[in-house]
Amino acid sequence: MRTDVLIKEGERVDDLHRKGYVIIQDPKRFCFGVDAVILSGFARVKKGEKVLDLGTGTGILPILLEGRTLGSHFTGLEIQPESVEMARRSVALNELEEKVDIVEGDIKETAAIFGGSVFDVVTSNPPYMNEGGGLQNPSGPIRIPSPSGLDAVLNYTKHNYLYMCAKEDFSGTHNFASNYAEHMKNARRYWDALNERKIFK
C-alpha cells in the first residue's frame, strides 16, 4: 500500500478485508453498503475478462472484484467529479493503477465514452426506487459492513441462488431464490408490504 496518497480532512480509510486492500470514504458524503459487497460476491468474472462498473461511486466494486477474481482489467464509470477523484486515490492507495481505471462520465454516454471497447462483464448497483419514490437515506453516514459481514460475502459458501429480494418484514435481511418464479413470489410479498406502507406504487 502506498503511503504518499492524499487523505483529505474528514475522510477515512477503511479495510476491505481482501488482499490488504482499503478504500477512502467520506462519512459526510457516501459510504458503500453491504449491497455492494454482495454484488461483488455474485458477479461472475472469469480469468482474463474485462469488467465495466456503471455508477461506480467510490470505486468499491472494481477494487473488490480485482481482489476476488482473475479478471484482467476493471473500469469504473462515475458522473460525480468528487467521487471520481476519491476513487482514483483509492486505486492509487492500493497500487492498482495497472488494473483499475476510474473514468468520469455519464452512464447515458457509455457508448461514446468507450467507443469500440469490449467488456465481458458489466455491473451496476443503482438506487432501488422509481424517480421521486422510495425512502431517502438519513442525513447521517451509511455504515460500512462489519468485518464478519465482508468475510461472509467474499468467502461465501457455494449455492444455487440466483436472485435476492429484501424480506417483507423489513428486517434488513433477504429471501434468496434459485429460480425466477420463486424470486417473483418473494418480490410480490415485498411489493405488497411496500404498498401497505404507501411506499411503492
Image (cartoon, rainbow, N blue to C red):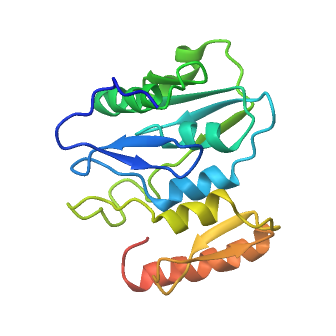
Which residue ends up furthest to the left in the rendered image? 9
**Total number of numbered discs in the rendering:** 0
Of residue 68 and residue 195, the one placed in the foreground of this image is 68
Q: Could you say where residue 111 lies in the image, as x and y percent from the top left? A: 58, 20
Classify 92 as above or below 47: above
Quick one: quadrant of the C terminus? bottom left
Classify 81 as above or below 140: above
Residue drawn 47% across the image and 77% down it: 172
- Residue 172 in sight here: yes
Which residue ends up furthest to the top in the rendered image? 116
Of residue 77 and residue 11, the one placed in the foreground of this image is 11
Residue 98 falls left or right of residue 70: left
Of residue 85 and residue 187, the one placed in the foreground of this image is 85
Q: Within the image, what quadrant is residue 178 found in?
A: bottom right
- Residue 107 in sight here: no
Q: Within the image, what quadrant is residue 79 found in?
A: top left
Residue drawn 42% across the image and 33% down it: 90
Q: Could you say where residue 175 lies in the image, as x and y percent from the top left? A: 64, 77
Residue drawn 62% across the image and 66% down it: 152
Residue 137 falls left or right of residue 153: left
Residue 23 falls left or right of residue 4: right
Classify 162 as above or below 176: above
Residue 170 falls left or right of residue 43: left
Q: Could you say where residue 57 lies in the image, as x and y percent from the top left? A: 41, 39
